């Protein structure tokens, strides 16, 4: 019996040592055609010229990959898209068959990741350490990308993904469509160059005084984000916390509340803001211009960015956009991006968009 | 001669500390993003009595003073006083200078309660109420387990550590399953803030905190007895068990009320009593009320700094921890003895 135990133990040990050596593989890129790219962390990375297997830990990138028609390249799916993103389940039902690559606490499942053996991995710039340690451990390029509220970055991401995944034409088509919609909105809102733009305060991230310092849909829709570039934006931070007095001092024409998650999970609500005695003198509250808006949903969705811009333009300039039916236009935008009908209607059913306006 | 000078200096310092909260409160009314000159501030404060003054007030002055600054300052005052008195009382009771106001598992209970509300219960059960309920629940569990021991003081401390760990584990479990948006709200709540201050919250929490602080101040002379050994205290005719239970109930109650409305603001209950002991000695008859006054002033000043130092606001809980830790190290280095 002892003899067998010894044998089993020695075989197991040999197996483990062999397995650990297998993990210490040489850099995958040696001998392959390569290209260099620069990610959102300004790191220059070398990636294979031909990419087949892609793993994205950043929801915005996964959505763009699907929009580019490269969903078949995906070898795994992150926890958020699998469990929290109802729209993505409709956009890409096959995600249910992909292995889960992150856990409920958003930590990466290293074993699954190694087993999936992707050519490249996409991560979030805010997880710099994760990206760098992953790359050092498994010798696969980890590209950190995010648009953080800016259109130019979203378009750069799209172009980069198109190049990497060999979907240049589709990327160019989507970029042109994106620009066309935004230009269409801006042509209308900028009809009178000297006209007073609505001043907007965004209450995001589950607290009245937390606000994004970059949020381009407001600008595109002809508004002014009052917290735009507010410190500590210079440090690359995408959100800030302001004093309630600052909101009163700004006296915004509109207050927009992040509404892109299940109604029961909303901490700040339209009713709360309208009832808050501290904000009673604010123009947005006095004129009942307090609305929900889409905002981020674990990073952006290109379709939602466009719908958001159109929705905000209609909120800010109801007369100019009187003929625009957001439901109809929203479904058209999502159809163009994901090729699926009635996506906007499905999203609105979940978010209860019918409760969003008071007019 | 020197002794008399020192006594006079201490008396002067004592008087200053007692008046400090009022002074800080009044000066803080002038601090904020919106500039309100002294003349307009006085007119605003007098306007409820003389309604005709309202017409000459700057725009929004009434709202800024009565709906933003006064509730926030009152909350800072009450929370600062509660945490300091709680820390000072527990340090005397447990005869341990490192005991803080959260030792009985109160902060973990409150954090768990808030997380339960923010992640699962939604708006139907506000985090303030849930935090208070679970802070009290943590305290009740600690008392129920700890009191049965032969040496209840040590047992209570140990049970506090265990209950704290238990609620921390439950909090981690909730964080594990929470959606990223609920997590954002939860982390922000846990940082400790005074910006949510409203008359509605104050109407519930202020009487609770005021009553608890008052009772503990009234018990200040007994704290000196309780900080002796149990045998010594018994010879003075004190019902130790009853007195200790009352102190624990009051400290837990005011800490729970403070944490429920302001989140977790650490270090106040540790720094302030030590600072007071450095200034006036170890007599709890002075330490307890002075801790209340200095704690109230400290938190109001800290909040003034966090909301006016930059264009963005830093949660006051982060600030107290950031300045509390180095401050405490300096205090420990400068002090040549442990006060109790």
Image: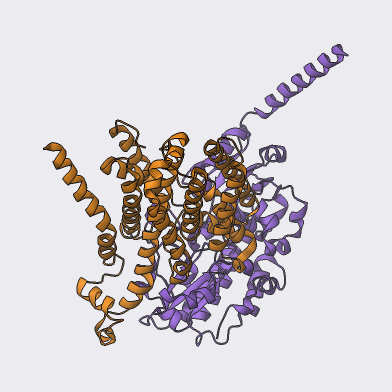
Residue situated in front as seen by the camera: B225 or A51: B225
Question: What's the residue at 42%, 63% (across, down)?
Answer: B195
Quadrant housing residue B181: bottom right
Quarter of the image where the C terminus of chain A is located: bottom right
Image hue for chain B: orange
Question: What's the residue at 66%, 52% (across, down)?
Answer: B177
Q: Residue furthest left?
A: B1
* For residue B27, side relative to residue A71 (left or right): left
- Mark yes or no: residue A286 visible: yes
- Mark yes or no: residue A162 visible: no
Q: Residue furthest top?
A: A3
Question: What's the residue at 28%, 75% (across, down)?
Answer: B45
**Percent coordinates x, y for residue B196 in the rendering:** 45, 65
**Percent coordinates x, y for residue B257 in the rendering:** 49, 59
Above or below A216: residue A35:
above
Residue situated in front as seen by the camera: A293 or A303: A293
* For residue A186, side relative to residue A47 (left or right): left
**Percent coordinates x, y for residue A19 in the rendering:** 72, 26
Quarter of the image where the N terminus of chain A is located: top right
Image hue for chain A: purple
Above or below B51: residue A169:
above
């Amino acid at each position: 019996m002892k003899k067998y135990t010894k044998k089993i133990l020695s075989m197991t040990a040999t197996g483990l040592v062999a397995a650990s050596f297998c993990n210490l593989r040489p850099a995958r890129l040696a001998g392959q055609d390569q290209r260099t790219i620069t990610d959102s962390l300004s790191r220059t990375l070398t990636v294979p010229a031909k990419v087949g297997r892609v793993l994205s830990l950043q929801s915005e990138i996964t959505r763009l990959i699907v929009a580019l028609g490269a969903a078949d390249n995906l070898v795994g799916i992150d926890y958020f898209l699998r469990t929290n993103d109802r729209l993505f389940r409709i956009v890409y039902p096959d995600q249910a068959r992909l292995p889960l690559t992150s856990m409920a606490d958003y930590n990466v499942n290293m074993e699954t990741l190694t087993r999936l053996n992707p050519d490249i991995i996409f991560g979030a710039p805010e997880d710099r350490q994760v990206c760098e340690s992953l790359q050092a451990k498994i010798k696969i390029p980890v590209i950190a990308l995010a648009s953080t509220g800016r259109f130019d970055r979203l378009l750069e991401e799209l172009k980069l993904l198109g190049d990497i995944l060999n979907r240049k034409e589709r990327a160019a088509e989507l970029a042109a469509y994106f620009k066309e919609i935004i230009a269409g909105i801006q042509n209308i809102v900028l009809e009178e160059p000297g006209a007073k733009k609505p001043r907007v305060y965004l209450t995001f991230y589950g607290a009245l005084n937390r606000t994004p310092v970059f949020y381009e849909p407001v600008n595109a829709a002809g508004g002014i984000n009052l917290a735009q570039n507010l410190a500590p934006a210079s440090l690359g931070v995408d959100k800030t916390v302001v004093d309630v007095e600052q909101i009163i001092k700004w006296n915004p024409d509109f207050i927009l509340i992040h509404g892109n998650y299940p109604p029961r999970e909303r901490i700040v609500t339209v009713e709360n803001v309208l009832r808050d005695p501290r904000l009673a003198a604010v123009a947005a509250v006095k004129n009942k211009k307090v609305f929900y808006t889409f905002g981020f949903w674990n990073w952006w969705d290109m379709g939602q960015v466009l719908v958001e811009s159109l929705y905000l333009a209609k909120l800010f300039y109801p007369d100019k956009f009187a003929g625009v039916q957001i439901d109809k236009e929203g479904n058209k935008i999502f159809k163009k991006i994901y090729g699926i009908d009635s996506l906007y209607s499905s999203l609105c059913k979940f978010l209860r968009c019918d409760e969003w306006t008071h007019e | 001669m020197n002794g008399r000078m020192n006594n006079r200096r201490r008396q002067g310092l004592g008087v200053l500390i007692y008046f400090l909260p009022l002074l800080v409160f009044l000066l803080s009314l002038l601090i904020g993003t919106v500039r309100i000159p002294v003349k307009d501030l006085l007119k605003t404060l007098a306007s409820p009595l003389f309604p005709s003054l309202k017409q000459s007030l700057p725009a929004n002055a009434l709202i800024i003073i009565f709906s933003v600054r006064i509730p926030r300052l009152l909350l800072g005052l009450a929370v600062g006083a509660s945490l300091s008195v709680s820390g000072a009382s527990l340090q005397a009771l447990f005869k341990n200078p490192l005991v803080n106001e959260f030792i009985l598992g109160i902060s973990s209970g409150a954090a768990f309660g808030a997380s339960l509300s923010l992640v699962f219960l939604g708006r139907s059960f506000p985090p303030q109420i849930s935090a208070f309920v679970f802070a009290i629940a943590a305290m009740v569990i600690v008392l129920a387990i700890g009191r049965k021991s032969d040496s209840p003081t040590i047992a209570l401390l140990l049970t506090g550590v265990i209950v704290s760990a238990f609620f921390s584990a439950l909090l981690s479990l909730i964080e594990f399953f929470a959606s990223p948006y609920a997590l954002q709200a939860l982390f922000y709540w846990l940082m400790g803030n005074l910006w949510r201050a409203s008359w509605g919250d104050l109407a519930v929490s202020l009487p609770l905190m005021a009553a608890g602080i008052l009772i503990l101040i009234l018990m200040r002379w007994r704290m000196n007895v309780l900080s002796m050994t149990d045998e010594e205290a018994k010879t003075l005719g004190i019902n130790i068990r009853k007195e200790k239970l009352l102190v624990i109930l009051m400290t837990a109650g005011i800490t729970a009320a403070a944490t429920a409305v302001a989140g977790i603001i650490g270090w106040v209950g540790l720094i302030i009593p030590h600072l007071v002991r450095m200034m006036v000695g170890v007599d709890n008859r002075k330490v307890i009320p002075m801790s209340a006054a200095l704690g109230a002033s400290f938190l109001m000043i800290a909040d003034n700094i966090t909301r006016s130092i930059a264009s963005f606001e830093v949660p006051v809980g982060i600030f107290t921890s950031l300045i509390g830790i180095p401050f405490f190290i300096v205090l420990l280095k400068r002090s040549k003895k442990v006060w109790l």
